[in-house]
């Protein structure tokens, strides 16, 4: 299959490729594909973690030790006030508090916390989105008034498989929108405003590739650092105020890191559990690094799948054998490693659809070529056998004239024959030689006719001329078995190749003699029927059953009557007769019953009508 031509095989080939590609693309939209893509993403993330850089943030942690020392959950306001009071001398760039301050509590502690907020520069508070009733829990007005920004605290902890890979940079409910806590902290640290478009966010000279989703949110993949964000326990800072120097010039996040005190935690691609406040700090480090993982769009994914399918189709459409399979191997390697290469370049490409489109189309193309090649091999073997049997047929048909020529020539050379006898034998040798030449030419003509390499001659002649020529040759064969051959009602005329039609009639007559018993009768009849002629050869031979009739014109099929009569045959003669008749615009009809003989009828277009002659007996 070097080159595919525009035929049914080609259409079937590309149809299978297209179907395989469609299955791969549709499968890439399933939940299973999304899960596999996530697993592949986590694997690549662990293989190629972000480079270690100097951190821009630090966490003031309310950990288990702090809870034990400072009174537990009921003392949140006092802990936060203490934290802000201790941080004030260090002058951090930004202070983000990852604790929702939406409820009124102890007035004394709230007053203290408010006073601490007044002395804090670039303070960011959080609002919490309650999914149950779809409303915001905002900080109390007395606290919000001192905040330079209010961000949401969502850390994507409710992802479908429990792993946080990306965080929404904004959350919208109706007309109310909050940026992420880390984004607000980043904005204040840089001292810039947020300019937004449908495809990205612009903060000063930095462009963040976070397109708005259908839900109105923007998500960004977090480049989780393998090195933990620096932390200082609030208890430690209370005991050692000099530790506050570590917060100078940094973005400080204040929040709960105790897993026993708060359910605010996420799971990273590294398989580690992380408190929500650290996740916000990791997002800030991602923004500071200015290197982002960008997800490729659906059109890019579709284009890559189509390219994979086209390459697979071309590989097995233009190549075969080991070059095709080697090229397919390179394609599969490219499809498998492509997402890894793109990941290193900062692009996240769906792993499942890439792999599925490559493997399915390559498997389909390779399988199709395999079966086509096998079919071609079978056809080649069939053709080889056909020509072998065709040669056998030719040699079998040549045997009679060659035997006559050989016998006559030997008699002429061995015996002293009279001049008259020599003349008779010379004439017989000449006639048999011409007959042999016609036989060979007829066989070659039939072969070229079957391959569409020859056009039929268009000459007009009567049916009687053809029948009588054939009867003259068949008569001696019939006489050996005492078979009477009768021709009656031979009417009409034909247009076409006389030699080929004569071969067809002669074949039917010799078959009738071959498969008829001694002292039986064969009848030849040709009757006009509208614009057609029905030329029939009726014998009284062994006959055939219905199963044999369905296969009688198949090449190399030998009937049971050949075995019953003891006659040799190749099973090609009747297939040639049918081809000749079909190329003359006609058809073959056969009626037969076991033990009652057979009738073969050639139905051919008539071109003229001859006068009805009297019955001729031979």
Image (cartoon, grey):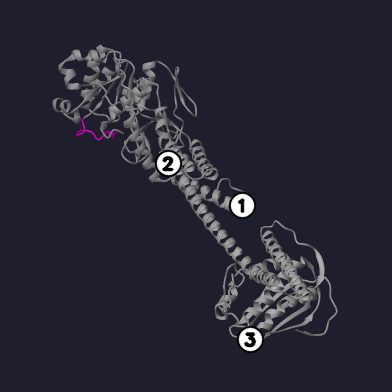
Q: Is residue 102 left or right of residue 577?
A: left
**Residue identified by numbered label 2:** 355
Circle 3: element type: loop
Separation of residues labelled 2 and 1 (CA atoms) = 30 Å
As displayed, is residue 11 above or below residue 128?
A: below
Instruction: Give percent across and percent down for residue 41.
Output: 36, 35
As displayed, is residue 332 above or below residue 404?
A: above
Which residue is at the far right? 611
Sequence order check, earlier mark of 3 and 2:
2
Separation of residues labelled 3 and 1 (CA atoms) = 53 Å
**Chain part drawn in magenta:** 258-268
Q: Are marks 2 and 1 in contact (CB under 8 Å)?
A: no
Check residue 260 for magenta coloring: yes
**Residue identified by numbered label 3:** 518
> For this rendering, which residue is in front, 384 or 177?
384
Name the mark nearer the viewer: 2 or 1.
1
Instruction: Give percent across and percent down for residue 31.
Output: 39, 45
Check residue 409 for magenta coloring: no
Tag of residue 312:
none
Separation of residues labelled 3 and 2 (CA atoms) = 75 Å
Residue drawn at point x = 59 percent, y = 70 percent: 571
**Residue identified by numbered label 1:** 7
Which residue is at the far front? 416
């Amino acid at each position: 299959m070097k080159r595919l031509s525009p035929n049914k095989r080609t259409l079937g080939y590309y149809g299978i490729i297209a179907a395989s590609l469609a299955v791969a693309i549709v499968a890439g939209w399933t939940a299973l594909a999304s899960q596999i893509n996530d697993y592949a993403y986590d694997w690549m993330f662990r293989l190629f973690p972000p480079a270690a850089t100097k951190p821009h943030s630090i966490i003031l942690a309310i950990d288990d030790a702090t809870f034990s020392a400072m009174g537990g959950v009921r003392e949140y306001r006092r802990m936060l006030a203490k934290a802000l009071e201790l941080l004030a001398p260090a002058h951090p760039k930004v202070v983000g508090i990852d604790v929702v301050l939406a409820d009124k509590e102890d007035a004394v502690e709230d007053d203290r916390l408010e006073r601490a907020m007044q002395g804090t520069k670039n303070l960011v508070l959080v609002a919490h989105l309650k999914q149950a009733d779809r409303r915001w829990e905002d900080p109390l007005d007395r606290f919000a008034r001192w905040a330079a920004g209010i961000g949401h605290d969502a850390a994507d902890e409710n992802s479908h498989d429990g792993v946080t890979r990306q965080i929404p940079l904004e959350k919208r409910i109706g007309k109310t929108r909050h940026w992420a806590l880390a984004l607000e902290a980043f904005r204040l640290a840089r001292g810039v405003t947020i300019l937004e478009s449908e495809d990205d966010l612009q903060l000063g000279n930095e462009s963040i590739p976070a397109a708005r989703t259908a839900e109105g949110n923007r998500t960004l993949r977090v480049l989780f650092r393998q090195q933990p964000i620096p932390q200082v326990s609030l208890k430690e800072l209370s005991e050692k105020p000099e530790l506050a120097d570590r917060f100078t010039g940094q973005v400080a996040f204040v929040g709960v890191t105790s897993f026993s005190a708060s359910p605010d935690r996420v799971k990273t691609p590294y398989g580690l559990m992380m408190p929500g406040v650290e996740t916000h700090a990791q997002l800030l480090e991602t923004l500071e690094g200015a290197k982002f993982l960008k997800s490729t769009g659906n059109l890019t994914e579709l284009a890559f799948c189509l390219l994979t399918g086209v390459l697979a189709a071309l590989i097995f459409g233009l190549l075969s054998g080991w070059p095709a399979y080697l090229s397919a191997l390179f394609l599969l390697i490219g499809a498998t490693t492509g997402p890894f290469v793109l990941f290193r370049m900062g692009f996240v490409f769906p792993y499942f659809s890439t792999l599925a489109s490559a493997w399915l189309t390559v498997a389909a193309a390779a399988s199709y070529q395999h079966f086509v090649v096998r079919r071609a091999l079978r056809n080649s073997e069939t053709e080889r056998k056909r020509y072998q049997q065709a040669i056998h047929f030719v040699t079998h048909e040549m045997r009679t004239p060659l035997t006559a020529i050989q016998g006559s020539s030997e008699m002429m050379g061995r015996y002293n024959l009279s001049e008259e006898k020599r003349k008779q034998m010379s004439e017989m040798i000449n006639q048999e030689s011409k007959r042999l030449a016609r036989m060979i030419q007829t066989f070659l003509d039939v072969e070229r006719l079957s391959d569409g390499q020859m056009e039929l001659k268009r000459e007009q002649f009567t049916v009687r001329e053809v029948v009588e020529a054939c009867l003259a040759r068949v008569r001696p064969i019939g006489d050996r078995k005492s078979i009477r051959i009768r021709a009656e009602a031979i009417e009409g005329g034909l247009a076409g190749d006389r030699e080929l039609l004569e071969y067809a009639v002669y074949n039917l007559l010799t078959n009738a003699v071959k498969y008829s018993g001694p002292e039986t009768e064969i009848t030849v009849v040709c009757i006009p029927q509208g614009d057609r002629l029905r030329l029939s050869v009726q014998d009284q031979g062994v006959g055939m059953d219905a199963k044999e009739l369905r296969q009688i014109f198949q090449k190399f099929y030998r009937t049971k009557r050949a075995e019953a009569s003891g006659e040799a045959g190749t099973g090609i003669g009747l297939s040639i007769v049918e081809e000749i008749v079909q190329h003359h615009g006609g058809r073959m009809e056969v009626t037969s019953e076991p033990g009652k003989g057979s009738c073969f009828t050639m139905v051919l277009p008539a071109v003229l009508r001859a006068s009805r002659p009297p019955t001729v007996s031979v």
